[in-house]
Amino acid sequence: MTYHPGQRVRVADRAHDGHHRTPGYVKGKTGTVERAYASFTNPETRAYGDDGLPQQPLYLVGFAQRDVWPDYPGASRDRIYLDLFEHWLEDAE
Amino acid sequence: MERSVHDRGGWPDDAPIDRSEHELADWELLIDALVGALGSHRLMNVDELRRGIESMPPDQYERASYYERWLFSIEANMTEKGVLAPGELDTRIGG
C-alpha cells in the first residue's frame, strides 16, 4: 500500500475508455486517505473476462462535500467517502 | 471530460428523484436469480454485468428499468461468450 491514512491524495483527472469504478464527479478532486483496505482483483480487467490480476490496492478516501460540489449548500464539515483503487490516486502533499 | 451515460453523479437535472418503492415482479426476481446462477457457474462476474450495462446505447439505457438493464447485459455477455447465438433470444420469444 503506497498511501497511508491521513495522507492527502488527488484523484487522477483522466478519461478511461471502458469499465472503471472512479466516478467522473470526483476526478481531479483532492481528499484524504481514511483507510487502506487491502488489495483486490482489478474490476477494470475483470469486466472483460480477465482474472483481474495483479491485485490493486484499494483505499477509502474522504472528501469535503464543498470540494466536490462547488455549490454545495450544506455544512462545511460534511464529507463524502469513496472506495478508490491506487492507480487512480496521486500524492497531493 | 465526457462522461458515459451511467456516470451521472452531479448531472444537472430539474426532475425530482423518484423515491417510490414497488413490488418486484416475478421476472425481476428471476433476472436477479439468473445473475447469481451465472456467477456461481463462472459464466459472468459482477464487473462484466456492470460493463454490459454501461455499454448500452444511451437512449436505450435511459428508457430501460433497473432489471431491464441487467437483462440487456446478460444477453450481451452470453452472446459474446457463445452461450447464446446472436438473436437467439428474440427468435425463441418470437417463435
Image: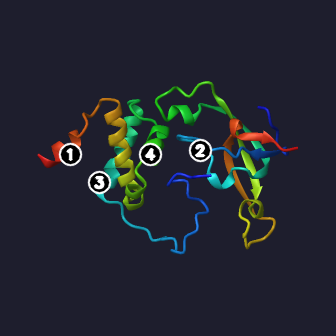
| Marks 4 and 3 on same chain | yes
Badge 3: chain ID: B
- Mark earlier in primary sequence (4, 3): 3
Q: Chain of mark 4?
A: B
The answer to whether marks 2 and 1 sit on the same chain is no
In the drawing, what numbered circle is on residue B90? Answer: 1
**Residue contact between numbered discs 2 and 4, judged by CB atoms under 8 Å:** no
Chain of residue at mark 1? B
Q: CA distance from mark 2 to mark 4?
A: 14 Å
User: Which quadrant: the C terminus of chain A?
Assistant: top right
For the point 77% across and 46% down, the residue is A10
Q: Are marks 2 and 3 on the same chain?
A: no
Indicate the chain on which mark 2 is placed: A
Q: How is the image coloured?
A: rainbow
Which residue is tagged 3? B27
Label 2 sits on residue: A21
Label 2, label 1: how many angstroms apart (C-alpha)?
A: 32 Å
- Looking at the image, residue B63 sits to the left or right of residue A93; the answer is left
The residue that label 4 is drawn on is: B55
Do callouts 1 and 4 mark residues in contact (Cβ within 8 Å)? no
The reply to whether the C-beta atoms of the residues labelled 3 and 1 are less than 8 Å apart is no
- Secondary element under disc 2, as helix, strand or loop, is loop
Helix, strand or loop for disc 3: helix
Type of residue at label 1? Asp
Question: How far separated are the C-alphas under marks 3 and 1?
Answer: 17 Å
Relative image position of residue B44 (x, y in whole percent): 41, 35
Residue at image position (85%, 46%) is: A6
